[in-house]
Structures are given as C-alpha cells and as structure tokens.
Image (cartoon, rainbow, N blue to C red):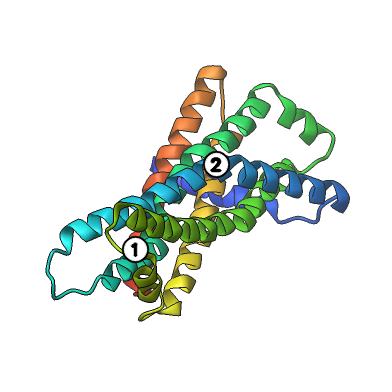
Amino acid sequence: MNFFTHFGAFLIMLKGMFTKPENWKIYWKELMHQCVEIGIGSLPIVVIISLFLGAVTTVQTAYQLVSPLVPQSTIAQIVRDSMILELSPTVVCIVLAGVVGSKIASELGNMRVSEQIDAQEIMGINTKNYLIMPKILGSLIVIPCLIVLSAILGIWGGRQAGAMTGIISTDIFDGGLRQNLNFFNINFALYKAYTFAFIISSIAAYFGYNVKGGALEIGRASTSAVVVSCILILFADYALAAIML
C-alpha cells in the first residue's frame, strides 16, 4: 500500500510540472544553471571512473583470452562493446545517482524544511514547474553527453593501458575497434542514458520535494533517493536489455 501511495504522489508531482512558465527568461536561466551544476560538477568523477574502467577491462580481458587462436584485436572489440553497452551507461549512472541524486534531494529538502518552497507557493509560483522541471530537463540534456564522453574515454583508457602494459599495440587495438561495429549498440546506450537520467533526477526530486521534518529527514531523504534510484536503474537496465536486445 505504501508503494502505491508513493507512486501516486510521484505521478501527481510529474503532472504538476507541465504548466506554462510564468517567465521564460528566468526558467531558461535556471535550466542553464542546472546543466552547469549537473554536467560540470560531475565531470571529474566521470572522467576518472571511465578511464580506469576501460583500463581494467583491457587488462582483465587480455588475462582471460589466453588461447593463441583468438586474435588480439578481439580485446579491443570486447572493450568497445563493454563500455558502450554496459559499463558507461549503467556504472556511471549509478555513480551519478549518488552524486547528482543526493545533491538534488538535499537541495530541495533544505528548501522544503526552511519553508522556501511554501513561500514561493504563497507568491503564486508553481514550485513543481520552477524547481523540479529544470533539474529533470538539465539531467536529460547533460547526462547522455556524459555517457558519450565516458564511453570515448573508457575506450581510450583501455587503448592506453594495453599499450603501456605491452598487452596489445595501438595499431592492433585501433584495427579491432573498427571490426564488427554495430551502430545499434550506440543507440541502445543512448536509450539507457535518457532512461537513467530521468530516473536519477525525478526520483531525487520526489524525495527532496516531499521531505517533512528537519536536518535528519533531509539526510534520510537523500539516502532513500540514492538507494531507490540505483535499484530502478538496475531494473530498467535489465528491462531494456530484455526488450531491445
């Protein structure tokens, strides 16, 4: 019963976002602010994780492919497909659920506890549209870009790790990247990126917007937002793979 209560309140929150903005200029400024906060703020951790994911994938793939019958270029293909299909979209979005999701939930929770949201509603502002919509739109714009960057950096990190450790030369690696490339994998990664971006932003906004209490409840709401987002990301990952692959 508690699940249906939260699910209904979540749908009501989403419905309340779709109203005409009172001032387009202010809404545009807030959207750009959220894009910078979510994108630039998450860029360092995305770069670090992506480089090491690619490097580790190259080393572990080479460790398992011990047969001389398997060409070395297969390592590059496995790294490429692993980063595009699973590692960049799913692992990076789980990390972003902790970075971006907790930030959104704590920001809205603090505004709710300090009665800033109540004050804006008294002034006639649709707070769902003004506070939540830019965060969701900003996530839908920026997070897929971060996923694309993550895949590129992961493949490049695997290429550099293979060259530095002597596992595979850059020429063979580059040749393997061009073999049997399925462009649907890139589209599938973007489908996952948009889905996960919506989950991260909307779930965090829901928990932050509906905080009741004080500072302790803000922390609990942030934790709940991250946990629920990670579970839904993993569930959506399986659902999308089962449906589309």
Left or right: where 63 falls relative to 174: left
> Between 59 and 105, which is closer to the camera in this rendering?
59
Q: Name the residue under label 2.
A: 44
Q: Position of residue 229 (x, y in %)?
A: 44, 45
Q: Position of residue 7 (x, y in %)?
A: 48, 48
Left or right: where 122 falls relative to 181: right
Residue at position x 38%, y 55% from top? 54
Left or right: where 216 falls relative to 142: left
Above or below, comparing residue 165 to residue 102 in the picture: below
Q: Mark 1 points at which residue?
A: 79
Residue at position x 56%, y 18% from top? 215
Mark 1 element type? helix
What type is the residue that disc 1 sits on? Answer: Val
Q: Where is residue 8 in the image (x, y as percent from the top left)?
A: 51, 49
Q: In which quarter of the image is residue 18?
A: bottom right
At label 1, counting other C-alpha atoms closer than 10 Å, the crowd grade (few under 14, some 14-19, many 20 or more) is many
Q: Position of residue 58 (x, y in %)?
A: 30, 57
> Between 56 and 81, which is closer to the camera in this rendering?
56
Above or below, comparing residue 112 to residue 80 in the picture: above
What distance separates the C-alpha of mark 2 from that of mark 1?
Answer: 22 Å
